[in-house]
Amino acid sequence: MGLLNLEKDFAFYAAYHSHPINIAIHMIFVWPIFFTAVLLFNFIPVPFDLPYINLSLFGFDFILVFNFAYLLTLIYAVFYVCFDFKAGSLAALLCLFSWIASSVLASRLGFQLAWKVVLAVQLVSWTAQFVGHGAFEGRAPALLDNILQAFLMAPFFVLFEALHFIFGYEPYPGFYDHVTAMVDEETEDMKGELLS
């Protein structure tokens, strides 16, 4: 099952994301939140020189700096691989791509334009998710119950859900059946709490 409790954590996530439109909204907007956060982290100043790599790709010269954006990416990537090796490895590659692409974008835009892009994407993405929860789930997002889930696990879980939807991916046979039973149990508990 990996180093973390994938069933329990995914059941927690799934309990807050059951409506197909809300799930689609999350699949569209969660990774842009991650990407723009990494973009912004490229501009956090450090008091010392950092290692870097000069690269040229498709006629563009750019520098990859091992800065706070890299550190954020590394934390996410390691966490995802520990969660589930197969899906986590793909998520780690997406994180790495986000770091590289955001580094290129940061060097092209500069801070004066980049922060405006980050702000616009973050506002649109978070608004869409809150609307998705309010209009389609009828409940507050998981962010209000577990901030770690909202910021650290959400990118992995939307990818995980997409892999299951498109390819039928399960980390082991019966995973989704077991998670569905856990979600049904949690949903019944929530209904019981609301009625009492």
Image (cartoon, rainbow, N blue to C red):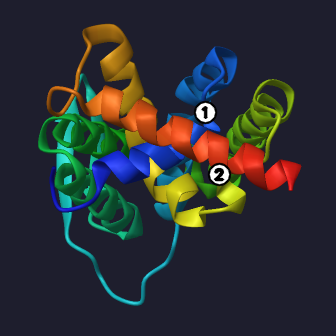
Whole-percent x and y of residue 139? Answer: 79, 41
- Circle 2 packing at 10 Å, graded few (<14), some (14-19), many (20+), is some
Task: Tell me how many marks there are.
Answer: 2
User: Regarding mark 2 in the picture, which secondary structure is present there?
Assistant: helix
The answer to whether residue 98 is seen in the rendering is yes
Q: Is residue 97 left or right of residue 173?
A: right
Q: Which residue is mark 2?
A: 142
- Which residue type does callout 1 highlight? His
Q: Which residue is mark 1?
A: 17
- Circle 1 packing at 10 Å, graded few (<14), some (14-19), many (20+), is many
Name of the residue lying farthest toward the bottom: 47
In the rendered structure, are the residues bearing label 1 and label 2 in contact, judged by CB atoms less than 8 Å apart?
Answer: yes
The disc placed on residue 133 is: none
- Which residue type does callout 2 highlight? Ala
Q: Residue at x 84, y 35 (%)?
A: 134
Whole-percent x and y of residue 20? Answer: 62, 16
The image quadrant that residue 102 belongs to is top left
| Alpha-carbon span between mark 1 and mark 2 | 9 Å
Whole-percent x and y of residue 195? Answer: 86, 48
Nearest to the observer: residue 75 or residue 21: 21
Q: Is residue 113 left or right of residue 71?
A: right
The answer to whether residue 103 is seen in the rendering is no
Nearest to the observer: residue 137 or residue 103: 137
Whole-percent x and y of residue 169? Answer: 23, 21
Name of the residue lying farthest toward the top: 166
Q: Residue at x 67, y 25 (%)?
A: 22
Q: Residue at x 26, y 13 (%)?
A: 168
Nearest to the observer: residue 88 or residue 111: 88
The image quadrant that residue 122 belongs to is top right
